[in-house]
Amino acid sequence: MFRFFFIIFTFSFLYISALAQDDEFKPLKKTEVTNSSDVEDEDEFKPLNQTEVSEEDEFKPLDSTSAGSPCSSSCPKNLEETCAFAEQEMSADTRKLYWILAALGLAVIAGILVRFNVTRKARTFFLLGSMLTFGFYNGGCPCMISGFEYTFLNLFGYTDRWIDALWFLGLIPITYFFGRVWCGWICHLGAVQEFLYRPGKIKLFRSVLAQKIMQWMRYTLIAALIIQLAVMGSIYWCKIDPFLAIFNLQLNYNQEWTSGILLVLLLLTSLFSYRPFCRSVCPVGISLGWISHIPGASVIGIEGKCASCKMCNNACDIDAIIRKEKTSVLDNKECIMCGDCIESCPQGGLKPLRKNKKNKVVVGCNSDCEIIKE
């Protein structure tokens, strides 16, 4: 709707500006004067004609230049299209900024809500709303992955548009203070996979070996992505992104086959595995996971008693908590701060804490609160 009104306004403005230069819109001179002497006697009441107006500068009618429009009639005709394009770019940047600030603001709110038992139940509504707004309404773009790519394009000197990188850069301090709440509560890409997931007897990618393989897949793919950005200087992922095909309800233009194959793979794996794209492909998730190594970062840790009951292990669908030698091991790099493990703990021992010498990134959940070597 916003795009429609903007286009109508732009074309109307240009059309009216063009008509304003036409002679038929110039002020009319007084031609029905019957007596010249009458005109002289009543000279002070004579309507101003166009010549007199030009001589009296302080009463000169405002033209489009005086109105302060950057695309005024003072622009040479061959520059009018350039001026209009500049206005359109400015409006697009403003709209993009609003979406980014809204996404980051919701992540901050989620970071607060996950810390309370009552408000943790709102996560499903956050994911649904994000999928509908950032996904289907906004077409899935821009997003944090494009922000990640633009960050490196800026660093490599291919562009200086840091506003396009703001979505990813803004998530870094939010993740430091609240954990990966973006991934667990807001991300529209993760929401699609989560709503598709159908837990059952078929449990793909749940073993320790599978976790290692997916981790190495992410390391390989993020390196390949950065190399592609450095060499090509352009974003290729958006051309084949299967999420764009989902949110726009059509295969990506000129990449129908590639986009279609990736779309089928995403849909099938999401049915039997929890968030497969997040755990094996997403460059943003793995980047935000590294923030947990910074001293003072938000991590999930044990504060209180632990009964070694495996309840947290069973509740963690993302497999940030896995079983190793009869011990549940929590890896905060993989944690998406969904709060399911906190909710499931009968002892209330799992809580968001600050990373320090006591609260490590990798923790063994047992009665001794064992610290696993990182």
Image: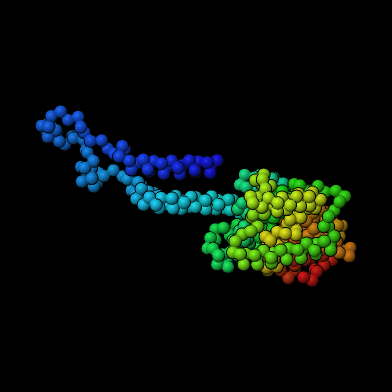
Pick whichever, 293 or 217, lies toward us: 217
On screen, 158 above or below 72?
below
Name the residue: 45% across, 42% down: 11
On screen, 236 above or below 62?
below
Place of residue 133 in the rendered image (x, y in percent of width and height, measured from the top left)? 63, 45
Dividing the picture into quarters, in which one does residue 279 lie? bottom right
Is residue 335 visible in the rendered image? The answer is no
Seen as rendered, the residue at the extreme left is 37
Place of residue 28 in the rendered image (x, y in percent of width and height, measured from the top left)? 25, 35
Name the residue: 68% across, 68% down: 294
- The number of callouts visible is 0
Left-right relation of 344 to 129: right
Left-right relation of 196 to 245: right
Dividing the picture into quarters, in which one does residue 348 lie? bottom right
Pick whichever, 352 or 147, lies toward us: 147
Name the residue: 73% across, 53% down: 262
Dividing the picture into quarters, in which one does residue 345 lie? bottom right
Place of residue 329 in the rendered image (x, y in percent of width and height, measured from the top left)? 82, 63
Q: Quadrant of the C terminus?
A: bottom right
Colouring mode (rainbow / by chain / secondary structure / one colour): rainbow
Name the residue: 52% across, 63% down: 160
Left-right relation of 369 to 262: right
On screen, 118 above or below 232?
above
Pick whichever, 150 or 345, lies toward us: 150
Seen as rendered, the residue at the extreme top is 34
Place of residue 304 in the rendered image (x, y in percent of width and height, measured from the top left)? 79, 61
Is residue 256 visible in the rendered image? The answer is yes
